[in-house]
Amino acid sequence: MTEIRMEDILQEILKASSIAIAGHVRPDGDCVGSCLALYNYLTTICEGEDFRVIDLYLEDIPEKFKFLPGSDRSLKEPSNRSYDLLIVLDCASMDRIGVAPSVMEQSLQTLCIDHHVSNTHFARATLLDPGASSTCEILFEMMDYDRIDRNTAECLYLGIVHDTGVFRHSCTTQRTLEIAGALVEKGVPFSRIIDETFYQKTYLQNQILGRCLLESIMVLDGRVIVSSISRKIQEFYGACPADLDGVIDQLRVTKGVEAAILIREEESQTYKVSMRSNGMINVSKIAVYFGGGGHVQAAGCTMEGSLHDVINNLLLHMESQLQAAGQVS
């Protein structure tokens, strides 16, 4: 469990004859973007090297990301192959690895590239930059710009767009915007990527959004907004987790709100919690307390118990932080 320098990563890659790339469970934009970007980049720079094996392991890629180059190359089941190097991207802990835990056990060297402050350094070597907007931003800094083709650039751009909320979140820096501009120079269709993968919603998604907004409640003097969706309602609409994309972000922009909570029932007494903050509340700290993780302003966890207990337990932590900031009595 050691920190690795960015300049040492390519040396690890160059001496490996077989490489596996993996992301986290329920891959989001940054996970998909970073995994496909690295896969495309390595297959490009290693083109013609017959001895080199590069495999990609990801759970089902969300439909809206399947236009990305290389999305059809991902393996959904672990193989029995032993790799010289496994690179895990955008993943903070061992229990978050998607389909490749067994691949990790059989790999001679393991490397994690990540930007989550909650990273547990589960790999043998870790490149961690909590100050980066996304794992895609870290990858861009690692790559030779002249060897980034349009395929790789599209994947990097998508990951940055999604983890910055289209450059709205506080993780967006001057460097983030400079990188985005450099990727646009590669011919990235930025308007299409933003519209079709971030803003565009199906009619079903709009129905779910409307329901969650209608049934939301304001608590803690209007500083926190909470919404939940039961398994029964999900089944009524025929909705899957992806159909809730964007709900938490719409809750977050409610005027006067410091944090938003969206709770989705997965099974009886088991809930998936998503949290967003406007800066005053550290939702990563709360998520980690309940066994999850994420960023200061975007985090999540899985909790058990009654819905009432889940909400109360989360609000106790948010109330404590708001009191410390002098926002509630």
Image (cartoon, rainbow, N blue to C red):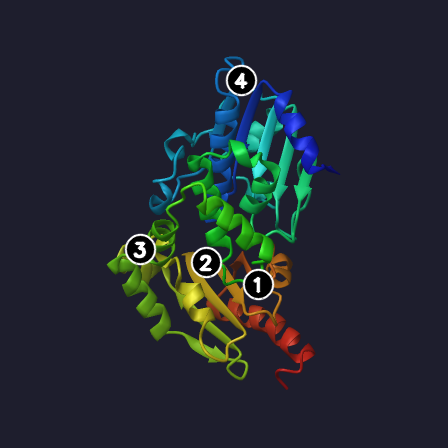
N-terminal of the two: label 2 or label 3?
2
Where's the N terminus, which quadrant? top right
Instruction: Say which of marks 1 and 3 sits in front.
Output: 1
Q: Which is nearer the eye, 326 or 268?
A: 326
Q: CA distance from mark 1 to mark 2?
A: 11 Å
Residue 280 seen in the figure: yes
Instruction: Say which of marks 2 and 3 sits in front.
Output: 2
**Residue 37, how many percent across, how many down?**
49, 37
Residue 109: quadrant of the picture: top right
N-terminal of the two: label 4 or label 3?
4
Asked whether the beta carbons under mark 4 and mark 1 sit within 8 Å of each other, the answer is no
Mark 1 element type:
loop
**Residue occupied by mark 1:** 170
**Residue occupied by mark 4:** 52
Asked whether the beta carbons under mark 1 and mark 3 sit within 8 Å of each other, the answer is no
Q: Which mark is residue 166?
A: 2
Residue at 67 percent across and 45 percent down: it is: 128
Q: CA distance from mark 4 to mark 3?
A: 41 Å
**Residue occupied by mark 3:** 239
Mark 2 element type:
loop
| Identity, as a three-letter code, of the amino acid under mark 3 | Ala
Q: Which mark is residue 154?
A: none
